[in-house]
Structures are given as C-alpha cells and as structure tokens.
Image (cartoon, rainbow, N blue to C red):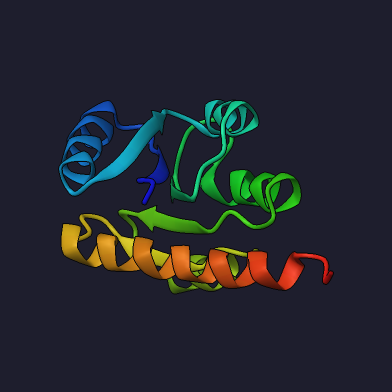
Amino acid sequence: MAKCRVLLVDDEPVFLKSMAKVLGARDYEVETAEDGAAALKRMAEREFDVVVLDQRMPGMDGLTTLEHIRRDFPVVPVILLTGHAEMDTAIEAMDRGAVDYLLKPAAVEKLCERLNAALERKAVLQGMLKPEG
C-alpha cells in the first residue's frame, strides 16, 4: 500500500520541519510549503492525498488558499490548522470545504486520526465521481 502523501502548509519553518519529521516517522510521505502560493504550486506539480493548512499566514491566508484548492483540486481533503481558537473561522472553513479544523498544537495521534478520516472521505468521494461503466 502506498504511503499517504500529505502537504503540510504553514508559515512557521520550525513547526513544518518538526511536524514533517513526526508524520514521516508514522509512515506518511510529507512535503511542506511555507505559504498558500507555494502550496498551490506544489499541488499543480504533484498529487497529494490530504492537505494540512495553517489558517493564518502572510500573503494568501488559509481560507483563501482553501478556496483555490476546492476549485482546482476538489477531491483533495483539507484539514485547517490554527493556533487561534475562533469558532467563526472554524465554521467558515467548514462552509468553504475544509473536512476538519484542529487547534495548534494538535496532538500527533489526533492529527493522524483526522488524516486517516480525511483519506476515507476522499476514497468515498472518488468512488462517487467515477463514471459508471
């Protein structure tokens, strides 16, 4: 079975490096991007199974990046991750198509559970979109 390909997007390099290492040790294949524009560029170059996206970033914020991902990569699930507990933002993220919303620092086990749930949702969605035949 192929490793789950995760794109981790956050403007904090230390967080990216440490989270990529931790997820890699749990058998996820992780690539990183430090902003929304870089994330969209990586997604255009390579297929990812799940995106974990920081909500607050300079330039293109997480919600704007989420909109672009939903438009250009509709079956890729996005988990929004933020260090700021704002219920309105969580609701808006879900309304815009995020499959989940976690607060930093998220426990690694909880993030892995959410990644696996997002993968299951993606598989169901892809099955629904396949032409009958």
Residue 40 at x, y percent in the picture: 61, 33
Residue 131 at x, y percent in the picture: 82, 66
Q: Residue at left 54%, top 26%?
A: 38
Residue 31 shown left or right of residue 15 in the figure: right
Q: Residue at left 38%, top 55%?
A: 81
To which quarter of the image does residue 30 belong?
top left
Q: Residue at left 36%, top 51%?
A: 1
Seen in the picture, residue 107 relative to 73 is either above or below; the reply is below
Seen in the picture, residue 81 relative to 99 is either above or below; the reply is above
Seen in the picture, residue 11 relative to 80 is either above or below; the reply is above
Quarter in which the C terminus is drawn: bottom right
To which quarter of the image does residue 86 belong?
bottom left
Residue 14 shown left or right of residue 54 in the figure: left
Q: Residue at left 55%, top 64%?
A: 122
| Residue placed most toward the observer, 100 or 25 | 25
| Residue placed most toward the observer, 97 or 3 | 3
Residue 125 in sight: yes
| Residue placed most toward the observer, 57 or 68 | 68
Residue 85 in sight: no
Task: Say how many tags the image has.
Answer: 0
Residue 65 at x, y percent in the picture: 60, 43
Residue closest to the far front: 133
Seen in the picture, residue 119 relative to 33 is either above or below; the reply is below
To which quarter of the image does residue 112 belong?
bottom left
